[in-house]
Amino acid sequence: MKIYFLLLSINTLMILGSCSTKNTDPIVVEDLLRSEILKRAVIDLNEKPVTVTAFPCERNAGGIHDFYSEGDYWWPDTVNPEGPYIRRDGETNPENFVAHRHEMIRFSMLVGNLTSAYLLTQDKKYIDAALTHIRAWFIDPETKMNPSLLYAQAIKGITTGRGIGIIDTIHLIEVVQSLLQMEKHGLLSEEDMEGTKHWFSEYVTWLTTHPYGIDEREAENNHGTCWVTQVAMFAKYTGDKNILQLCADRYRNILLPGQMAIDGSFPRELQRTKPYGYSLFNLDAMAAICRILSTEEDNLWKYTTPDGKSIEKGIEFMLPFVRDKSSWQYPPDVMYWNEWPVAQPFLLFGSEGLRKKEYLQAWLPLEHFPANDEVIRNLPIRNPLIWL
């Protein structure tokens, strides 16, 4: 698979080199991904909806419709095995409950790929299949998830849920981008549109008013970035202009000046035990914010703080380490060092938003269909066609 994409990318680059007027050519991207998208879509057509209600957990302090997960880096205390868990940063405990997160990721992947297949073929059967999953998660009273995250990233012996768990729903952003494409193409019934917009309107209200949501909003690292990414995406679908403005202001006045160093790096991410992966992840989330919120009147791609920080500065900092990871000047990640980078969305979005052909050239030969669970968990944007 990797060789196939590399050979295809070389041919694509030759085509791209002759296109002087476009920096992100949808036809080039479609040609690169078409075969694999359609191959997966044939399988996806037969997949049945599975939501949080299919996996009850006795440790969940909520009900069957409540999303539940447990903090990744929390482990039993060897000195006091029956006591509260203790933290081991960057080391994922495989025994913790993450079934709801896995199903949400599956949901996102199915809907994103099926919507991509529709955009390639105009065959409505792919949208019909995607909508069965969407209705199960957001509309069907027997299977839908509650629009809140009261019980995410719980820690045994410490808490039944945390604001930090809100990052788990980052995987809904491509579901919403798919819904936006369906709405644009006139593929949503009144009932489906009303039901999904009601769900996300309630969730945005919870994210912006509940103490957990406020805690996550105020986080000074990738969690604060992902709060803005999610709220912006969901508010864009519901048409909440006040929340969209709040998110744009927060990007300009809080995220960019507070998280980025003058050289374009993210110091708080570099201090983690997985500095490379977290730097990629945070940059992807910031680029997504620029992609979601930028308008002709307010182009966040072009915004620069008074001391020179910008999304372009962030991309330019990471670009050499994507092209050649061996040049990374910081400690390697304690886990999954060999699995990164993949086709990072900041390169694709940046090539479009900043009109930089070299970003697309760096993106094309990377792995577009990663299989590693940890990589997939930290790559919530996996379906380029629904964004172009």
Image: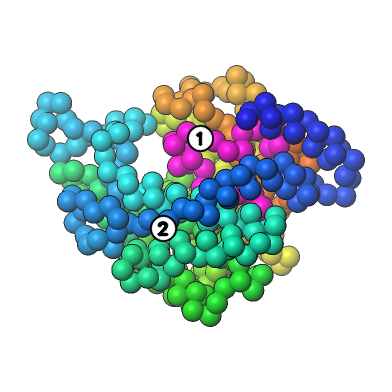
Numbered disc in front, either 2 or 1: 2
x, y (%) of residue 55? 28, 52
**Residue named by callout 1:** 371
| The magenta stretch spans residue 333 | no
Asked whether disc 2 touches disc 1, contact meaning CB atoms under 8 Å apart, the reply is: no
**Residue named by callout 2:** 49
Image: 191 above or below 224: below
- Quadrant location, the N terminus: top right
x, y (%) of residue 179? 56, 65
Residue at coordinates 19% horizontally, 56% vertically from top-left?
61
Residue at coordinates 44% horizontally, 49% vertically from top-left?
105
> Circle 2 sits in a helix, a strand or a loop, which is it?
loop
Q: Is residue 154 visible?
A: yes
Residue type at tag 2: Pro
Q: Which residues are magenta?
A: 363-388
- Outermost residue toward the bottom in this view: 190
Image: 178 above or below 104: below
Image: 358 above or below 68: above
Q: Residues within 10 Å of mark 2 (few under 14, many from 20)?
A: many
x, y (%) of residue 323? 67, 27
Looking at the image, which is closer to me, 43 or 8?
A: 43
Judged left or right of residue 101, residue 367 is right
> Circle 1 sits in a helix, a strand or a loop, which is it?
loop
Q: Tell me the chief SS of the magenta region.
A: loop
Judged left or right of residue 55, residue 132 is right
Picture quadrant where residue 95 is located? top left
Picture quadrant where residue 348 is located? top right
The label shown at residue 136 is: none
Residue at coordinates 38% horizontally, 56% vertically from top-left?
50
Picture quadrant where residue 117 is located? bottom right
Residue type at tag 1: Ala
x, y (%) of residue 330? 52, 23
